[in-house]
Structures are given as C-alpha cells and as structure tokens.
Image (tube, helix red, strand yellow):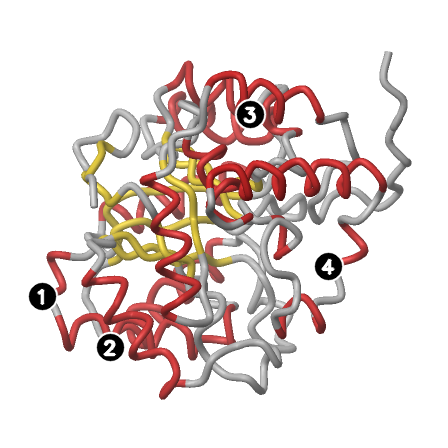
Amino acid sequence: METISFGRTGLKVSKLCFGTMTIGSSDWKPWVLDEPGAHPILKRCLDLGITFYDMANWYSLGESERIVTSMLTSMVPRDHLVLATKALYAMSDDPNDRGLSRKHLLSSVDASLHRMGTDYIDLFVIHGYDPSTPIEETMEALHDIVRSGKVRYLGASTMFAWQFEQMNHMARVHGWTPFVNMQCQYSLLYREEEREMLPYCCDQGIAVTGFSALARGWLSDSKRIRSQTDVYFNEFYGDDLDREIRAKVESMALEHDTTLAQVALAWVCSKKDICCPIIGASSTTQLEDNVNALQLELRQDEIATLDALYRPRDVINDHVTNPMPRLLERT
C-alpha cells in the first residue's frame, strides 16, 4: 500500500487508516468482535500494508487498545506501526474520568500506555471539544505530554472549525505543541466539513483523517450486525436524498462491476483535502473490499455527478441538540 506524508509533518502513514472500534468486547456493543475474531483481520491489515491504526480509550472501555496493540506488536516491531488513540469520553462514573482537564488527560495517556504495552503513542487525539475546561489548561497539558516523550503528535476530532483554530491559536501564542491532525466525519452523505474545516486544514497543512466514509453502513451492505443494532444508523441517515445518493452509488458500482463500498471509498479518496480515510471491518472479506477501493479510479464526470447530488444537512456531532430538517428541493 502507498505510504504518504501526514500533512506537513515528517511522519509517513499508509494511505488507509484502520479504525479499531469494531474490535474489543461484544459486551460493550453487540457488533464488536471479541479477541479471537480480531486476529485474522489485523493480520490481513498488515499483509495489505496498513501501518496506521486508530484507537480510543473509550472503545470497549480500553479492551480495544489492549487487544489491537498486543496483536499487532506480536506480528511486527512496534516502530513499524503508527498508533493513534483518543481521550475525552467518560471511562467510569468518576466525574474526573472524562473531559479534557489536565488531570484526565495525564491519567488517560498513562492508562492507554499501560493497556497498549508501549512507552509512546504516535498520535494522541482529543475525541472532541470540552466546553467545561479552559483551552489554556487543555493545550498546556497536551504540550507537557508531548514534552514528556509519551506522545509524538497531537490531533483533534469532532468540533467546529472555529473551536479547532481557537485551540491551535492558543498553542501558537504560548509556543506549545499544535495539532497536526483533524479527524472528522466525511462521506457522500455527510460533507458539512467542506464549508470551513477542510479549507482551514488545507491552508494550515493539517492532515485530515475522515471517518465514517460509508456512513455507518448506509453506503455498503446494510445487513451487517452493526446496521441492525446501531441506534444512530437510521437517526442520522435515511431521508429521500440519502436514498437517491445510495441509488446512484449502486448504479456506478454495477457499471464498474464492483461494490457500493468501493465506489463510496473511491469518491472519498478522490478528495485531495482528505489525507487518509479511516476504514473499519468486521471480516477479512469486508477489509479486502475496502482496501480494493484504492484500485478504483472514478472518472471526473462520475465524481461530478456524485458531488452534485448533495444538499446541506444537520451537523452530526455531540454539539448539536436541536437539529433542523435540511432542504431537499433543488434550485
């Protein structure tokens, strides 16, 4: 698999990043693979040349970090991997065991390192924005973590562009470590980040990793366990325009003799503002299907056709509590 530069940093990563939310404990979510089912998928990831892995302490409440890292490092040297993990969400009922306070960030990094069995994290990502903690406190704590040698690079996820710039501005003013990565949702069904976040990151040389490229399964075979049990599957997606876009993807898949997932991922890969899509898989077959999207090059007229179908929609993140229906009519 092709190796690319991670934004303006010197870090090199695989063109696709493997997201590990599907690995951990089925007690956490019914669609999550337990340890025995994870091994063949992670082995195949390595065989296919994937070196970049996205984790989070919240995934299976730590089990994902433990399983993924222990399996990967049993097959290849640690230094051959780029391992990312995240912190923000509650890990227990303790009010200090969540958020972006100095206390929680420092303890989260140590806990992740312990579970992962490593002495450093390549990319430490804040899993969202914490309005209850001063930005100065968060950014200084993150800088201290980098200076300690426990983390190499910093990233952020799921926030508005003005919040992201506000945090990076604070780092620049004080000479602290800035974010070099933004992890945001991006797919044919969700393109709101094209308004501000993607242009900002492009201008600043910040690597964008796009998650949910298949819209939680809406742009793939929706008969998977996750699509049947994910409470957000039909809450976020499924209006008439989503169905129209899916139908167009289906027709293109037939024309190319390929799958919906490959067309949807090929479209994401055609966007220069996306450094590398984050893919997931619950089987080696699904993994190989996703990776094969790198071999599919859509024509410019096909990309333009898919682009033209989109209409603005609700922002899908933790900050929007009063969503409004989008305008479906075309003008």
**Location of mark 4 (residue):** 233
Q: Which numbered disc flags the more N-terminal residue, 4 or 2?
A: 2
In the rendered structure, are the residues bearing label 3 and label 2 in contact, judged by CB atoms less than 8 Å apart?
no
Q: Based on the displayed image, in which of its 4 quarters is residue 307 positioned?
A: top right
Q: Which residue corresponds to the image point at 58% horizontal and 54% vertical from the top-left?
A: 220
Percent from the top left, x then y, of residue 136?
A: 50, 37
Calculate the distance from the C-alpha at mark 1 to the C-alpha at mark 4.
37 Å
**Residue 71, labelled with which disc?**
2
* Mark 4 or 2: the one toward you: 4
Q: Say what amino acid the circle numbered 4 marks.
A: Phe
**Location of mark 1 (residue):** 77
Report helix, strand or loop for mark 3.
helix
Calculate the distance from the C-alpha at mark 1 to the C-alpha at mark 3.
35 Å
Calculate the distance from the C-alpha at mark 4 to the C-alpha at mark 2.
30 Å
Report helix, strand or loop for mark 2.
helix
**Location of mark 3 (residue):** 197
Percent from the top left, x then y, of residue 285?
A: 39, 67
Q: Say what amino acid the circle numbered 3 marks.
A: Met
